[in-house]
Image (tube, rainbow, N blue to C red):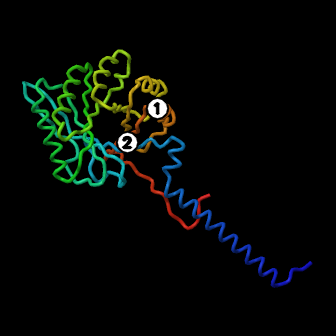
Amino acid sequence: MEQHPREKYMNDRILTLSSILLLALIVGVMSWNDMHPQIKNAAQGTDIITGYYADKEATADIIPDDDLPLTIAQGEFGYANGKTGFIRQGMPPVTIAQRQVNLLLGFEGMPKNPAETLAKTKALIKSWENQGTSIAIIFLDYRPKNPDFKAYSGFIKALKKYFSATPHVLVPVADISWLDDRQKAGRQLLQEDAPIFLVDINKPQLPAELIRKLANLGYGFQLILPAGTPPAGIDGKALQKTGLFGGASLTLTPHQPFLKKEPAIGIFPRL
């Protein structure tokens, strides 16, 4: 039976209107997902990049334009002939507003008399604050072949007392060798004053055995990942299962810039 022209016209209009509403709904849902990718990533447990580490050769122009915390290498303290030396390496003080900024200081040894080291550290922090940049965490990188954990623990206590009026969080950079049982006593000395450990894995893979050692650490930890795009060899879900993992900082270096993929905005949804 042939449809009446008016009835056919109305049916066509209803079909067209329904198609437009369905397309609008799909576009809306896809656009919302594009603007909120972190929710999907968090659910999958695979987005482990929670900050950046600007190494000694990094410059301000390679820092991604987002709000993730930034840790900046500043150089290394050395002690010879009873003198305290500091070799400055890394980004100079600049204004970094509305972002958590941390500094990483290297130590080739531990000072017998920390007074001058403490004063130089304070002056370094002040040079950043004079640029309008607040410093939250001080990462301490002392990783010789045979570390003196007792001296290291004493230095952390002295640093904490020195900054008691304007406290900063102090976090040691842990060497992978410290995860072995033979270094357990030394680790425990540092745990008295450190909220977490920062572990530099130095490679784009994280073997299951290393994840097991991190889990057995029984203490909160964060990771420094090597430069480049987030490595596929890092099992984010396994890290989350330890219950101790606090995120990872991706190394920024001019030799291997990190290209952050921005979500594309288009007229039609990507199906």
Amino acid type indicated by mark 2:
Leu
Q: Quadrant of residue 253?
A: top left
Secondary element at image label 2: strand
Cα gap from disc 1 to disc 2, whole angstroms: 21 Å
The residue where tag 2 is placed is: 250
Q: Residue at x 12, y 27 (%)?
A: 79
Q: Nearer the viewer, residue 223 or 152?
A: 152
Q: Quadrant of residue 22?
A: bottom right
Tell me the quarter of the image containing the N terminus: bottom right
Tell me: 1 left or right of 106.
Answer: right
Q: Residue at x 20, y 38 (%)?
A: 75
In the current view of this chain or complex, which residue is farthest to the front?
Answer: 165
Amino acid type indicated by mark 1:
Gly
Residue 269, placed above or below residue 119: below
Q: Nearer the viewer, residue 267 or 30?
A: 30
The residue where tag 1 is placed is: 243
Secondary element at image label 1: loop
Tell me: 238 left or right of 132.
Answer: right
Q: Residue at x 33, y 26 (%)?
A: 175
